[in-house]
Amino acid sequence: MTDTLIDIQNLEIAFGSGQVRAVRGVSFQLGQEKLGIVGESGSGKSTVGRAIMKLLPPTAKVSAERMRFRDVDLMKADERTMMTVRGRRIGLILQDPKYSLNPVMRIGEQIAETYRFHHPKVSKAKTDSQALDMLEAVQIHDPERVARLYPHEISGGMGQRVMIAMMLIAEPEVLIADEPTSALDVTVRLEILALLDELVARRNLGLIFISHDLNLIRHFCDRVLIMYAGRVVEVLEARDLDKARHPYTQGLLASLPTIEDPPARLPILKRDPAWLDDLALERPR
Ligand SMILES: Nc1ncnc2c1ncn2[C@@H]1O[C@H](COP(=O)(O)OP(=O)(O)O)[C@@H](O)[C@H]1O
Ligand SMILES: [Mg+2]
């Protein structure tokens, strides 16, 4: 059994004056594992990720019986505490690295600056060589050349590697990746997944991998949390997905195309999401 890194019990998040209940009673724990959160657009996945980072807008009303990251009580943590958590102990990778990189600064300088931020006493020479090492660690083959480029000169896949490199400098304990490969071509996507997989294993990280793509999640993650309309409807080991009991999960699985048997029509849930509440299913812990 690995350490519990994140422990969430009965998380509720509403926006505005409560009309939008984006997250409804979500509970889960994250260990040193790859935990997938899957669900259609609007099911509350990103909101859960942002709640852990305390990056929700002020209009969000958050309550929980428990929301902890190791020694940090995230319900009570103030901005000062969160400054020691965000980007340092929990790294966030988003879909489009373009918006996270500084457009007027060369890649190498950005990585060096991040390194200096986390290791202020280190010499310039050491910082520059660390920047190149980080690029190598994320399997960029010609780090000297790439270090001299500006963000607009690199591809999406390369940008995502750079973001991962910058995040690793702080040696985080948890990574939250929100649709990190959704904007990438299939082959590049597989390379980024392989990289994440290796880093998570080598550094004993806990990874929350958010995606709308069940096929990707089931192959990449150890465990899968299925969200629908703000709720966790099922939590399964990825290898047990075929044993899914919830109709929404079964619907998701049935709508995955297979080479042998492409579905003629996508299955749809015919009733209101509230109906799901009445299902006599074991509630995931
Ligand atoms: N800042 C916000 N203000 C109001 N509603 C929001 C805000 N962010 C998210 N929501 C709503 O919360 C719900 C869940 O959104 P989100 O977590 O982004 O879903 P997902 O990531 O699964 O696509 C949606 O109904 C969305 O419209
Ligand atoms: Mg999202």
Image (tube, grey):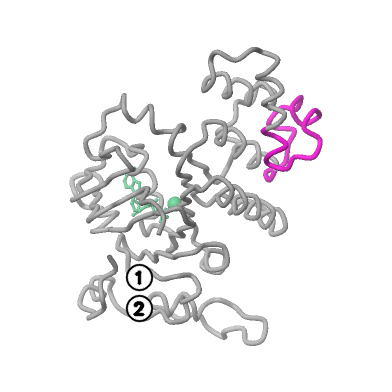
| Disc 1 crowd, CA 10 A, few/some/many (<14, 14-19, 20+) | many
Residue 181: image location, x then y, percent: 60, 52
Q: Are marks 2 and 1 in contact (CB under 8 Å)?
A: yes
Q: What residue type is labelled 1?
A: Glu
Can you give x and y, in whole percent of width and height, for residue 270 in the image? Answer: 34, 80
x, y percentage for residue 243? 43, 82
Q: Mark 2 points at which residue?
A: 246
Residue lying at 60% horizontally and 15% vertically, measured from the top left: 122
From which residue to which does the magenta span run?
A: 134-157
Find disc 1 in the rendering and name its residue: 234
Quarter of the picture holding the N terminus: bottom left
**Gap between marks 2 and 1, in whole Å?**
7 Å
Residue 29 picture quarter: bottom left
Residue at the spot x=48%, y=38% of the render? 172
Q: Quadrant of the C terminus?
A: bottom left
Q: Where is residue 255 in the image (x, y as percent from the top left)?
A: 51, 78
Helix, strand or loop at mark 1: strand
| Residue at figure coordinates x 39%, y 66% from the top left | 226
